[in-house]
Image (cartoon, rainbow, N blue to C red):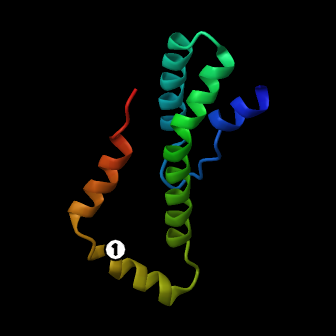
Amino acid sequence: MGGCCCSAMLPRYPPNMGQGACQAIEGAAILGKKLASIADPAAAFQTFEEVRLERTSSIVSRSWQLGRLAQLANPLLANLRNFALRLVPESMNERQVKALLDVEF
């Protein structure tokens, strides 16, 4: 049981979105609810993993993508990135933030 639980609770968050501590707090809150509502700890951890997997995978993937984009070494590509990012509408940024904040405890 320990290996499965730890892998669900400790995904590897790249630092590009600053989500490590946020997701740890979120995960602890959700795990606490599962342990309080499901008598069998193994079943509670299994349910927790199922609930968290899609969200955490999405955040980790998005963070890696942003990191690759942010750390472009080629000056031409970096200038192109900077130009393109200035054209991104504020509404797109707001949607990204809303997706991070949209979580059920």
Secondary structure, mark 1, is helix
In the picture provided, is 2 more to the left or to the right than 40?
right
Tell whether 104 sits left or right of 67. left
Task: State whether residue 90 is above or below residue 69.
Answer: above
Task: In the rendered view, tell whether residue 50 sits above or below residue 13.
Answer: above
- Measuring from the top left, give residue 65's x and y in whole percent: 52, 66
**Depth check: 5 or 74 in front?**
5
Q: Is residue 15 above or below residue 46?
A: below
Q: Is residue 66 above or below residue 19?
A: below
Residue furthest bottom as drawn: 76
Position of the C terminus, as image quadrant, is top left
Residue 58: image location, x then y, percent: 50, 53
Across and down, in percent, residue 9 comes to 63, 33
Disc 1: CA contacts within 10 A as few (<14), some (14-19) or many (>=20): few
Give the residue type that dot 1 points to: Leu
For the image, the number of numbered tags is 1
For image coordinates 56% across by 42% down, the residue present is: 53
Residue 8: quadrant of the picture: top right
Q: Quadrant of residue 93?
A: bottom left
- Name the image quarter holding the N terminus: top right
- According to the image, label 1 marks what residue? 85
| Residue at 49% in and 45% down | 55
Q: Residue at x 34, y 48 (%)?
A: 99
Residue sitting at x 64%, y 43%: 11
Along the viewing direction, whichever of 43 and 86 lies nearer the viewer: 43
